[in-house]
Amino acid sequence: MFLNHFEYFAPKAPEETLELVGRLGSKAKILAGGTDLMVVMKAKAISPEYLIDINGVEEFKGIFCEEGKGAVIGTNTKLAEIQFSEAIKAKYPALAYAAGEVGSSQVRHMASLGGNTCNASPAAETPTPLVAMGAKVAVSSLSGDRELPLEEFILGVRKLDLAEGEMLTKFILPEPAQKSACRYAYMGRRDAMEIDCVNMAVNIELANDSETVMEVKLVMGSVYPRPLVSREVPALLIGQKLSDELIEKAAEAAQGEAKPIDDIRASAEYRREIVKVLARRLLKEAYAAAKGV
Amino acid sequence: MKQLIELDINNRVYEVAVDARDLLLDVIRKKVGLTGTKKGCGEGDCGACTVLIDGKPELACIKLAIACQGKKITTIEGLIQEGGALHPIQQAFVDYGAVQCGFCTPGMILSAKGLLDRNPHPTEYDIKHELSGNICRCTGYKKIIEAVEAAAQVWSKEGVK
């Protein structure tokens, strides 16, 4: 269980990091928490020639949350920091909850928000609520920054919209709308130290009457190569006041859209059932929470 | 190629020659000689190798030693009190019979310390949630949870560091 040899860099500033990322290209891997990277390197699944450890770069860390202005979260912000952040808990409870359900306490103190996205595992926890809330990512290189929605950044299993010389540097979260709420839930074989067989987030925004759905976004994790945004649920629910029958119909629609596979964690059949259960539960929870705002 | 680095372990600075690929766990056990930190799964799942880095529980089996320069590392040996007395969490583990084979114990105790430092009044759920990354195959978890609850009581009374 030894690692293969690599050359180690520990830059102290963003420019220095981007210079290394640009120069070393695909022969290098970025080391943030290492909770995914070290495990695959120990298994010799990958053997990068260079590691760029970004833990010495202060600019890549931190939660910047301003009243009325959404939030910006640095790529190397640890999941435990997000889990315990009073600002995130108040404004983005679904994200704080999802971050707090990743791996174990040790993993959450090591692993970063950026790593959870860039590992591009279909079963990742935090991309699901982030996509539901309409988060964008900033991708940086020596030639500048670009921003794109997170749902367009994750392309598939271990695939990102990242050109050579680019790295993810921050997440940009919009301010939650008035009368809106986002909720997250997951299902796995047990509660802790597991990888989700399905996870899901629902974001609902209501009209001024506090009953009519104005926007709804239902995002499914672990049932598709990347976070799957439902097209049918908004088509069914926008402009409607939700009833149990309507929620049941929407949950069935989400179930129809999911494209799960059989694997070690669950069968496709079971996952499809769970999609319906979580969709029903989350639509109810998010609707009730949005009414309460 | 080896290079000399300084590691602050239990408030003592050790100068060690490491390769970039050396893991913190192996350096602590083999080069520094502190064998209280255990190697279990080696994949970051079992928690036996838990150490505190700047007070936060982390997994030494998937942590590069070279990345720990300038940080304060605490291993189970670092919990010793004045005169060689046991730390209150250790004492609670003894009192409540929370140790059987003992292999998971250093990690359990350091995770518990990480929790109590942040939250001295944890609920049973908090304890279960925060210790869920430490796997014990002997005792079951009931006595471990009771020990942490007891340690929390001592903590809030005496404010132990």
Image (cartoon, grey):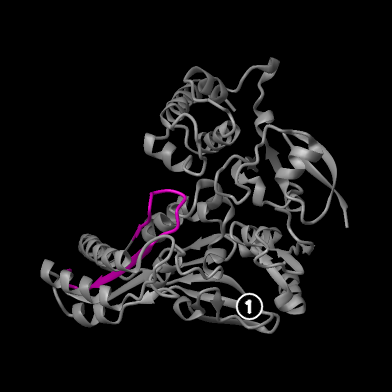
The residue under the point 56% across, 70% down is A118
Residue A259 in the image: above or below residue B120: below
Between residue A67 and residue B36, name the one nearer to us.
B36
Which stretch is magenta?
Answer: A185-210
In the picture, which quadrant includes the C terminus of chain B?
top right
Q: Position of residue A76 (x, y in %)?
A: 60, 62
The image quarter in which residue A125 lies: bottom left
Q: Any magenta on residue A141?
A: no
Q: Position of residue A276 (x, y in %)?
A: 24, 67
Between residue A275 and residue B119, name the one nearer to us.
A275
Q: Secondary structure at mark 1?
A: strand
Between residue A62 and residue A191, name the one nearer to us.
A191
The image quarter in which residue A129 lies: bottom left
The reply, left or right, for residue A267 in relation to residue A156 is left
In the picture, which quadrant includes the N terminus of chain B?
bottom right
Q: Any magenta on residue A201?
A: yes
Q: Position of residue B151 (x, y in %)?
A: 49, 25
Q: Which residue is mark 1?
A: A140
The residue under the point 34% across, 69% down is A268
Residue type (three-letter) at the residue carrying disc 1: Ser
The reply, left or right, for residue A101 in relation to residue A9 is left
Residue A57 in the image: above or below residue B126: below
The reply, left or right, for residue A162 in relation to residue A22 is left
Query: Can residue A209 be seen?
Result: no
Q: Position of residue A197 (x, y in %)?
A: 39, 62
Please, which chain is the residue tagged with disc 1 on?
Answer: A
Query: Can residue B42 be seen?
Result: yes
